[in-house]
Amino acid sequence: MAEPIDRRRFLRVMGMSLGVGALYRVLPAWADQGAAGDVVRTLARANGERLTPFTFVQLSDSHVGFQGPPNPTGTLAFEKAVQVINGLAKPPDLVLFTGDLTHDSEDRDERVRRMRRFAELAKRIKAPNKKMVPGEHDAGIDGGALYQELFGESSYSFDHRGVHFVALDNVSRAKPEVGADRIAWLEKDLARFPPTAPIVVFTHRPLFDLRPDWEWFTSDGDQVMELLNRFENVTVLYGHIHREDVHVTPHAHHYAARSLIFAFPDPEKTPEKKPIPFDKEHPFRNLGLRVVHAGPGAAAPDTVALGVEEVELTLREHSGTEGFQQLLKPTTA
Amino acid sequence: MKTRIQARTHRIGNGIALTALAGALALLAPAAHGEESPRVIELTAKRFEFAPNRITLKKGEPVVLRLKSKDVVHGLYLKPLGIDTEISPDKTTDVPVTPQVTGQFTAICHHFCGSGHGNMHLTVVVE
């Protein structure tokens, strides 16, 4: 039998910066021959789809409805990100939103307005599939009732081009936890897949203890990861922390996306969790879009590495005070 | 006369006996108090703060955090001290804590309670 192919590099992002949206281009790390072909055929049997190259985007923490000193521009970064995605040469197959789509409000009618505004902006993205999970601002206050009324189930799964995607709600119970019911659902959902199946979990909070005193954790995240431990290719995409982060374990890679509203500082260098102040000269600093390109792996030619290109939401044509005022003018779109 | 002196002596004797008994009880009380009545620290949670927002404990000393909410359900979470509880507005919640580590810690509200939820912190100093 041929040397096993390094399937752990199925989805790997090079570099630390993921930007406000991270564009992933995925190629299978194997050709359709020999042992590699066996892998592809196994995956096709498991979920009915053949593994083929595709591109997807992660956006996170748009906090539609937020107005405050860390970002007085409201949804402008979100709108700019939409324009950048729509300007790509090839539209992504799929866009994943990892929570805090809206900013919480005491007024239920206002929450509805914000969710509808989010949906309106998201609809402008030219991609055939858009999937989302809630954040605590969307679902924490009412157990997810309004979110589910407007957007549907908060935990679900689907297959796309041979990859199994799992949307996992870890906010609707108000506390940072998935809950026994959802964990039981996940176990059943994963049962039909072989260990080689590529799994992408998208959720809101980190599934490990990143910084518990900043509420960057999920109390039963270890139980979730234990269910995923038998799989060789696990990627977890999440938001919540408003900054990029990469956390690698023997069985999974966890990637956090930047937000579309404001950034938090590095938790290892800062004792206090305070938003990074707004900079009029660089209004979208720490907010951006990342494009990932696939290429041959450096370690071995039969593996895939994903190169990353930063796409900054630049305002070169708007600089200085006058430009900033132009930035704040309502868009006509 | 003899009877009155005897009665007075009896009363004085009883007084001395009672005093001695009270003294003995007083000597016993601190040990009994430490085991049965740990120090109670009252904490109130409301959007979006804890009051007081700083408490000091001693390593090895059992205390009870007596938690109340003035408005909605809040949470109190501090992993190093094993604190993980919800605070309901309709009841008082007692949480026994005996710190085993020293240091300054930040406890948080981990039950989402509104847009200012992320700013609810309690500083816990363990000496």
Image (cartoon, rainbow, N blue to C red):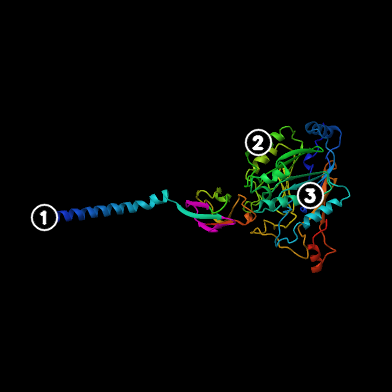
Q: Which mark is residue A130?
A: none
Residue A299 figure quarter: top right
In the shown orientation, is residue B22 left or right of residue A251?
left
Residue at 72% over, 45% down = A150
| A279 vs B34: above or below | below
Inter-mark Cα distance, 2 to 1? 89 Å
Query: The residue tagged with tag 1: helix, strand or loop?
Result: helix
Residue at 56% over, 48% down = B86
Q: Which residue is mark 1?
A: B2
Q: Mark 2 belongs to which amino acid? A: Ala
Q: Which stretch is magenta?
A: B46-68
Give percent across and percent down for residue B68.
52, 52
Q: Residues within 10 Å of mark 1 (few under 14, many from 20)?
A: few
Q: Residue furthest front?
A: A109
Q: Which residue is mark 3?
A: A122
Inter-mark Cα distance, 3 to 1? 105 Å
